[in-house]
Image: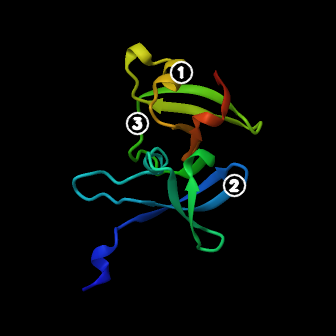
Amino acid sequence: MSEKIFKIQKLLKEVTLWIHPEGPVSGSLFLRPEDGNTAAEIPDDVLNQEAAFLVMKSNLDGEIRFYNRHAIVRAVYTHQSGSDMPAAQQIQCRLLMMDGSEISGNIRENLPPESARLYDYLNTSQQQFIRVFTGGDEICLVNKSYIVRVNEQ
């Protein structure tokens, strides 16, 4: 019997994770490809899963590592312009993180009119990691647990 039937097809997506207290770690997340019935996964999907750990392949030594989601402060990756990203409302904001760093960018989400304020989004979003477009094709996924303050710009 072939071992191929036991393997799950995955795509590698390069990311940089900021791990508390380790610091930045470069590697690749394993993402599910499009299969005809469902869209391909993006890093947002992986970070916002309920499982306690995610799998990452280190760029440093190729080692497969399991990181606790609660220890991930933020994740940064690039996306292809116009690919699977909402083109709805944009909210300019600046986030002050527990480590003293600041992240500036905008949130682009399809928000219902009754909860389209930044305050509403931060409090009603069920996701632990929120997506902030920080410029160009860069996206920063920020763990809400590590945010000290948010200002609308």
Which is in the foreground here, disc 3 or disc 1? 1
Callout 1 amino acid: Leu
The answer for how far apart the CA atoms under marks 3 and 1 are is 16 Å
Q: Is residue 60 left or right of residue 119?
A: right
| Residue at 69%, 55% in the rendered image | 24
Q: Nearer the viewer, residue 107 or 71?
A: 71
Circle 1 residue: 118
Quadrant in which the C terminus is drawn: top right
Query: Can I make out residue 149 in this image?
Result: yes
Q: Is residue 55 above or below residue 87?
A: below
Expressed as whole percent of the image width and height from the top left, the position of residue 143 reads: 58, 39
Q: Is residue 15 left or right of residue 83?
A: right
Q: Is residue 143 above or below residue 64?
A: above
The answer for how far apart the CA atoms under marks 2 and 3 are is 27 Å
Expressed as whole percent of the image width and height from the top left, the position of residue 85 reads: 42, 41
Callout 3 amino acid: Pro
What kind of colouring is applied to the model shown?
Answer: rainbow
| Residue at 37%, 59% in the rendered image | 32
Circle 3 residue: 86
| Residue at 50%, 17% in the rendered image | 117
Q: Nearer the viewer, residue 53 or 45?
A: 53
Expressed as whole percent of the image width and height from the top left, the position of residue 131 reads: 52, 38
Callout 2 amino acid: Pro
The disc placed on residue 24 is: 2
Quadrant in which the N terminus is drawn: bottom left
Q: Earlier in the sequence, mark 2 or mark 3?
A: 2
Q: Is residue 77 above or below residue 104?
A: below
| Residue at 51%, 23% in the rendered image | 123
